[in-house]
Image: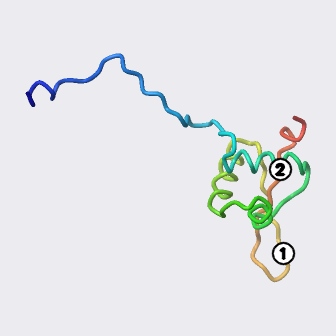
Amino acid sequence: MAGQLEGWHEEGARHNNPRPAGVIRPGSGTDVLLRFLRQSRGRWFFHSELVLALGRSKGEIDWALLYLVREGQVESRLTELPARKPVLRYRLTNRQQAL
């Protein structure tokens, strides 16, 4: 019997990915961040402002920002602050602001 099962596999069975790459799921950290930035068009935000305003974890905001910057929906800018290390600020790209 074990010999029969070794070569057995279902043909024609399709596996559906419930979380396909590149899809922003409703209610996800990325979705919440994008909606927040759309409400504040043109304004630059520090990472910590986004974490506090959205009540999401630092890691969740990090991943959302990385994804949205890579997709060209959010832009980042390095900002010099007095007596501090340079930090990034984020806002919607001009293309996203027009939507």
**Which x, y percent locates residue 14?**
41, 22
Q: Quadrant of residue 13?
A: top left
- Position of residue 17 relative to residue 90, above or below, is above
Amino acid tagged 1: Leu
Q: Residue at (47%, 28%) from the top-left corner?
A: 16
**Which x, y percent locates residue 74?**
77, 48
Q: Residues within 10 Å of mark 2 (few under 14, many from 20)?
A: many
Q: Is residue 7 left or right of residue 26?
A: left
Q: Secondary structure at mark 1?
A: loop
Residue 58 vs residue 54, the one in the foreground: 54
- Position of residue 56 relative to residue 94, above or below, is below
Q: Which residue is outermost to the bottom? A: 83
Q: Secondary structure at mark 2?
A: helix
Q: Residue at (8%, 27%) from the top-left corner?
A: 1
- Position of residue 61 relative to residue 27, above or below, is below
Q: Nearer the viewer, mark 1 or mark 2?
A: 2
Quadrant (top left/top right/bottom left/bottom right) for the C terminus: top right
Residue 80 vs residue 52, the one in the foreground: 52
Q: Residue at (74%, 63%) from the top-left corner?
A: 51
How far apart, in angstroms, are the residues tagged by discs 1 and 2? 23 Å
**Which x, y percent locates residue 12?**
35, 16
User: Which residue matches tag 1?
Assistant: 81
**Which x, y percent locates residue 25?**
65, 39
Among numbered discs 1 and 2, the one appearing first in the sequence: 2
Q: Residues within 10 Å of mark 1 (few under 14, many from 20)?
A: few
Amino acid tagged 2: Leu
- Disc number placed over residue 11 in the picture, else none: none
Q: Is residue 64 left or right of residue 88?
A: left
Residue 85 vs residue 12, the one in the foreground: 12
User: Which residue matches tag 2?
Assistant: 37
